[in-house]
Image (tube, rainbow, N blue to C red):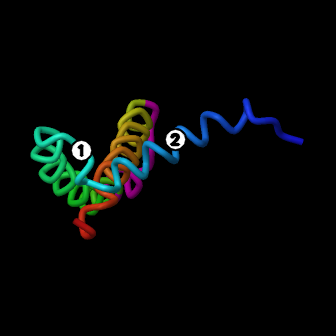
Amino acid sequence: MSNSSTNLPRERLSELREMVADEQQLPTGVRLVAAPLRFVGFWAAVALPFLYVPLLFGGLEASELTVFVALVALNALALVIGHNYARS
């Protein structure tokens, strides 16, 4: 069972996604910044996994584990930022 109060955040999130997906609804300043950010995010998401190889090849020690987790988090952020790059 679900009530309307539990679905409210999901509805707002889907509305926000629709607004961001329709670039014409965004202010001009945001549109000017969004295109280069998508470009950088997309290509960072492509390139960052190559940095995993040397870390995984040598084995992860305690200090390298932090770097690996940070790289994975940065890669996830780049994926989110650059996911609409080819569509624009």
Q: Amino acid at mark 1?
A: Leu
Residue 42 drawn above or below residue 5 = below
Q: Where residue 86 sits in the image (x, y, percent)?
A: 25, 69
Residue at the (35%, 37%) spot, across then down: 67
Above-or-below relation of 9 to 15: above
Q: Position of residue 40 (x, y in %)?
A: 17, 52
Residue that label 1 marks: 26
Examine the structure image and report whether residue 25 is included in the region drawn in magenta: no
The kind of secondary structure the magenta stretch mainly shows is helix
Q: Quadrant of residue 87?
A: bottom left
| Residue type, numbered disc 2 | Leu
Give the residue at x 75% y 35%.
4
In the rendered structure, which segment of residues is drawn in magenta? 53-62
Please tell me whether mark 1 sits on a helix, a strand or a loop: loop
The residue positioned farthest toward the bottom in the image shown: 86
Of tags 2 and 1, which is closer to the observer?
1
